[in-house]
Image: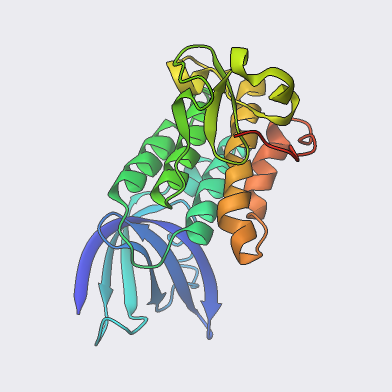
Amino acid sequence: MEWHDEGFVLSRRRHGEGSLVVNAFTFEHGRHAGLVQGGGSRAQAHLWQPGNRLDLVWHARTAEHLGSLKGEPIRLHAADLLDAPLELAGLSAAMALLDAAMAERDPHPVLYAATLRLIDALGEDEAWLADYVRFELVLLAEAGFGLALDRCAVSGATEGLTYVSPRTGAAVAETAAGDWAPRLLKLPRFLLDGSRPDRAEVVDGLRLTGHFLDQRLFDAVNRPPPQARLRLLDLLGPPAPDAPTQPAD
């Protein structure tokens, strides 16, 4: 069996003397592993860095086998961002989340497009931070846990949405929050109107998505979130306050 696809390197681990087992996130075949013969050698090591976008060929005797993986560079994003610590942290966090959260060999073309959009936006202009938060929202939706941010779950209003219930993932208008407001998650404005956020709003967005990543993906299997995501949040702002304990509907 053989396929030819493009994808991002998610993770790599040593196998034997000079080979690697690589996980990649591909457009048509989802998260897919393969053995890269000689992948740990000096000649190839730079190619198989997390975040690099490669032209991939996978081959195996049967679909159940690990199979072998070969790749040619499309763009070596990891090397491009070596001197940009915040952007490199964003790249690393996105790859780690995909590696930890997505089922193996399950295609997600919408999520692949969101990943490509995010990585293409990485650069000196911090506008990419909004794309990162939106990437996490797409990841949640593709995993079956999309948030309902278009109308208030209490009043049905579509204006004045400022909070999200940490239990249901539904938006709540400021006028409907009442005494529950301190227990709700903030809904940053840029997720509703496409405006450019400042860092404080980005941190609010990451705390919003992070709550549901933890609750619905990682806590369910008794696993912590990837360290790479925690590093990104640490670079952007102070530690998060205690999570809400008595969420409203």
Location of residue 103 in the rendering, given as x and y in whole percent from the top left corner: 42, 64
Location of residue 114 in the rendering, given as x and y in whole percent from the top left corner: 37, 40
Q: Residue furthest front?
A: 155
Label count reads 0
Location of residue 201 in the rendering, given as x and y in whole percent from the top left corner: 62, 22
Q: From what the image shows, is residue 86 above or below residue 27?
A: above
* Rendered residue at 61%/58% (across/down): 218
Location of residue 139 in the rendering, given as x and y in whole percent from the top left corner: 45, 46
Can residue 49 be seen by looking at this rendering?
Answer: no
Q: From what the image shows, is residue 240 above or below residue 110?
A: above
Q: From what the image shows, is residue 121 above or below residue 51?
A: above
Can residue 28 be seen by looking at this rendering?
Answer: yes
Q: From what the image shows, is residue 246 above or below residue 142?
A: above
Model colouring: rainbow
- Relative to 58, 10 lies left or right: right
* Rendered residue at 45%/62% (across/down): 48
* Rendered residue at 50%/72% (across/down): 40
* Rendered residue at 28%/62% (across/down): 29
Q: Please identify the quadrant where the N terminus is shown.
A: bottom left
Q: Along the line of sight, which residue is nearer the eye, 164 or 104? A: 164
- Relative to 181, 75 lies left or right: left
Q: Quadrant of residue 60?
A: bottom left
Q: Along the line of sight, which residue is nearer the eye, 14 or 92? A: 92
- Relative to 183, 134 lies left or right: left
Q: Please identify the quadrant where the C terminus is shown.
A: top right
